[in-house]
Amino acid sequence: MLRASNLILLAVLLLSPLCSRANNAIMWDAKTDTVSADVRGAPLWPLLENIAHQTGWHIFVEPGIDRKADVKFSGLTSGDALKKLLGDLNYAYVPQTNEADQLYVFATTMRAATQRVNVATTNKPAIAKHVPNELILKVKPGTDIDALAKALGAKVIGRDDKLGIYQLQFPDAAATDAALGSLQSNPEVAAVDYNYIYDTPPAPQAIANAPVGPVSLTLDPNAASDPCHPIVGLIDTGMQSLGSQLDPFVMKPINVTGDTTPLSTTMPTHATAMAQTILRAVSQQGSTSGVKILPVNVYGASETATTWNVALGVQAAVNGGATVLNMSLGGTSDSTVLDSIIQQAQAQGVVVFAATGNNGANTVNFPAADPGVIAVAATSGSQLASYSNYGAGTAIALPGSSLVYLGNSAWVVQGTSPATAYASGVAAGYKGINCDTWSQIQAMMQQKFPVPAK
């Protein structure tokens, strides 16, 4: 059984002391991800209060537990440092999208960590929810976008004339807000929003002694002539090679950002992890398949994606033949422009799976909350994962942890992201075998993967 700390991703921390006493100091080096500490008899609660104060984390503790940290070390990795500081206690770190990250400290189970460590102020910088000084809009046919932008004092910095969607840049926030109000009542404009930001999904965590090996799957040689075999549009980060056995399942990647920065060769990207998760779900239904994956990079080299790039990515996937969209991403802000692009895809028969979010809240992030989108929550065992969102509209819940490989190294990724990829893989694999309608497949999945009660 994997220890909870093996399933976490540690956030980048500011280089700063976390304890006020001179001999109770912890120093985190964000550049090298190394930690040095000299902590003498620090009680658990004050230690966690200081951590919460410096990092901005929302920390939850299992009631009744306590210990004193009495350690001195230098140059440990952040994961090893937390093990030293928390001793025999378990912990799980859950990064969030557009929200404060969460740390759970517990002796029994993560779900038992319910007591909040309250801190009045934090030093964690606020997360911008939209790109400064930008709007995206969809205009009605016949609209002269260049004239409209000029009248608003804006520049057109992104455009898709076929879709009628545009990205405008303004000189300052005041001009942006004024233009938003003006465009909302403009009869030539079908939809207008800020260009909202989606944080980068958590990256996988390295793990030793993996309990299962890499995905084993063979491409069906008759797939190209079988209309029942779907193409999964993977709206995500850039994707690395999956290896000689799985690369035949991957179509030529699309990058809507224009960025050509080389990908890491030492750690799998989020898209690489999601692609393997999709194919693992497919492999559990048979040793051969004709399912294909079309990777669409909407992040580029940035740590964040925007609704503009996601909208372009959705359309690029549909244009590339995708009949399933896997959207293991999301945010708390609804975009009517992106909604319209997703609705157009759905009108063409494309089924969309999206992650509910990792806030552990009774709500669903966008685009999972959009009408017709299949919102996927995460399970841990037979229960709803404590970090998983579960609000109204959540359709199904699948395992929230996935084991993936890059070369010979194993990694674990956790959250509603892999749950969504599992769902896409189950649906695509089932479609390829049985050729049922998507509505039939969705009904089957709702019966097989119900959302557990919170």
Image (spheres, rainbow, N blue to C red):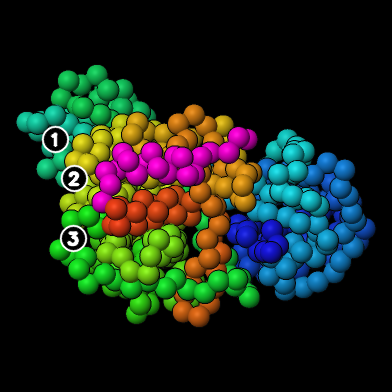
**Mark positioned earlier in the residue sequence (3 or 2):** 2
Q: In the drawing, does residue 129 fall left or right of residue 163?
A: right
Q: Which x, y percent locates residue 187?
A: 17, 20
Kindly identify the amino acid type of the residue bearing the numbered disc 3: Asp
Identify which residue is drawn at 28% across, 47% down: 436
Observer-side mark, 3 or 2, equals 3
Q: In the drawing, does residue 307 fall left or right of residue 451?
A: left
At label 1, counting other C-alpha atoms closer than 10 Å, the crowd grade (few under 14, some 14-19, many 20 or more) is many
Identify which residue is drawn at 79% across, 44% down: 62
- Cα distance, mark 2 to mark 1? 9 Å
- The span picked out in magenta is 435-454
Does the rendering let one see residue 412?
yes
Task: Identify which residue, 163 or 347, lies in the foreground.
Answer: 347
Is residue 230 covered in magenta? no
Q: In the drawing, does residue 232 fall left or right of residue 393?
A: left
* Placement of the C terminus among the 4 image quadrants: top right
Identify which residue is drawn at 83% across, 61% down: 88
Task: Please name the residue that numbered disc 3 is placed on.
Answer: 226
Identify which residue is drawn at 54% across, 52% down: 399
Question: What is the residue that sits farthest to the left in this orientation?
Answer: 142
Q: Which x, y percent locates residue 430?
A: 34, 54
Task: Please name the residue that numbered disc 1 is placed on.
Answer: 145
Check contact, mark 2 vs mark 1: CB within 8 A. Answer: yes
Q: In the drawing, does residue 241 fall left or right of residue 110?
A: left
Kindly identify the amino acid type of the residue bearing the numbered disc 1: Ile
**Mark positioned earlier in the residue sequence (2 or 1):** 1
Query: Helix or strand or loop: what does disc 1 sit on?
Result: helix
Task: Please name the residue that numbered disc 2 is placed on.
Answer: 159
Disc number at residue 373?
none
Task: Identify which residue, 377 or 163, lies in the foreground.
Answer: 377
**Mark positioned earlier in the residue sequence (1 or 3):** 1
